[in-house]
C-alpha cells in the first residue's frame, strides 16, 4: 500500500530528481518541444530554480513524485512549474502540490498551461482556476498556444 506523499521544500540534493521529473513530463508533450538541451535544463534547475527556494516536491520514501515552482510578480502569486513523474497522475499528488502552493501564494494566483494540455486545463479548473486569456504562442518560448488561468477565491485549494 502506498502512503500519502510528503510535501516539502526542495533541497539542492533534489535537483537531479527534480530535473528528471521535469524532463520526463515535458518529453510527453510532443506539441511543445523544449527549446533548450537536456544539459541546459538540468543546469537551470540545479543552479537557478531550486536554489531560489521556491520549489516544493512531493516525496514518497526516497523518490520524488512531483515538483512545483512558484513565484510572486506583477501583484500575483504564480505557479510556474507543476510536473509529476509520469505514471503518478491520478493519485492526488498534483492536487497536494497545488494546494500547498495555493496556501503560500498571494491572491490572485495565476498560471499558464498549453491549450493542447487538456488534462492540465481540466485539473486547474477543478481546483478553482478560471481561464482569463488565450494566447497564440507568441508570448512563450515554445511558440505554442496557451491559456492563462487565474484563481481569486482564497477558500479554494485549501481543502
Image: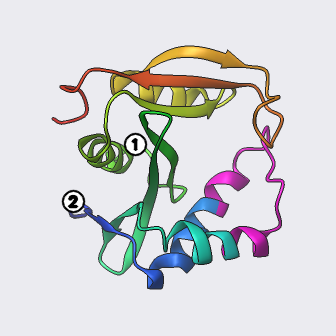
Tell me if residue 1 comes above or below residue 84 in the rendering: below
Left or right, 132 with reference to 123: right
State which quadrant residue 32 falls in. top right
- Percent across and percent down for residue 22 are 60, 60
Image colouring? rainbow
Magenta segment boundaries in residue numbering: 23-42
Residue appearing at x 59%, y 70% in the figure: 48
Residue appearing at x 43%, y 28% in the figure: 124
Q: Which residue is mark 2?
A: 4
Is 28 included in the stretch rendered in magenta? yes
- What is the residue that sits farthest to the bottom in this orientation? 13
Residue appearing at x 77%, y 76% in the figure: 39
Left or right, 151 with reference to 119: left
Q: Give SS at disc 2.
A: loop
Q: Which residue is mark 1?
A: 90
Q: Nearer the viewer, residue 83 or 51?
A: 51
Q: Give SS at disc 1.
A: loop
How far is mark 1 from mark 2, CA to CA?
Answer: 13 Å
State which quadrant residue 116 falls in. top right
- Percent across and percent down for residue 70 are 44, 50
Q: Nearer the viewer, residue 87 or 39?
A: 39
- Percent across and percent down for residue 100 are 27, 48
- Percent across and percent down for residue 111 are 51, 34
- What is the residue that sits farthest to the front in this orientation? 75
Tell me if residue 74 comes above or below residue 10 in the rendering: above
| Earlier sequence position, callout 1 versus callout 2 | 2
Q: Dot 2, crowdedness within 10 Å: few (<14), some or many (≥20)?
A: few
Count of all numbered marks drawn on residues in the image: 2
- Residue 14 shows which numbered tag? none
Q: Quadrant of the C terminus?
A: top left
Residue appearing at x 46%, y 78% in the figure: 14
State which quadrant residue 141 falls in. top right
Amino acid at each position: 500500500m502506498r502512503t500519502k506523499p510528503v510535501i516539502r521544500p526542495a533541497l539542492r540534493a533534489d535537483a537531479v530528481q527534480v530535473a528528471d521529473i521535469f524532463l520526463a513530463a515535458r518529453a510527453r508533450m510532443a506539441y511543445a518541444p523544449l527549446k533548450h538541451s537536456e544539459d541546459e535544463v538540468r543546469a537551470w534547475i540545479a543552479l537557478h530554480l531550486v536554489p531560489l527556494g521556491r520549489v516544493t516536491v512531493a516525496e514518497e520514501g526516497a523518490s520524488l513524485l512531483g515538483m512545483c515552482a512558484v513565484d510572486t510578480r506583477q501583484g500575483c502569486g504564480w505557479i510556474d512549474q507543476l510536473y509529476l513523474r509520469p505514471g503518478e497522475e491520478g493519485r492526488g499528488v498534483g492536487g497536494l502540490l497545488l494546494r500547498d502552493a495555493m496556501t503560500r501564494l498571494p491572491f490572485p494566483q495565476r498560471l499558464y498551461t498549453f491549450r493542447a494540455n487538456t488534462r492540465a486545463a481540466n485539473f486547474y479548473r477543478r481546483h478553482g482556476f478560471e481561464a482569463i486569456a488565450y494566447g497564440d504562442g507568441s508570448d512563450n518560448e515554445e511558440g505554442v498556444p496557451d491559456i492563462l488561468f487565474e484563481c481569486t477565491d482564497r477558500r479554494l485549494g485549501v481543502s
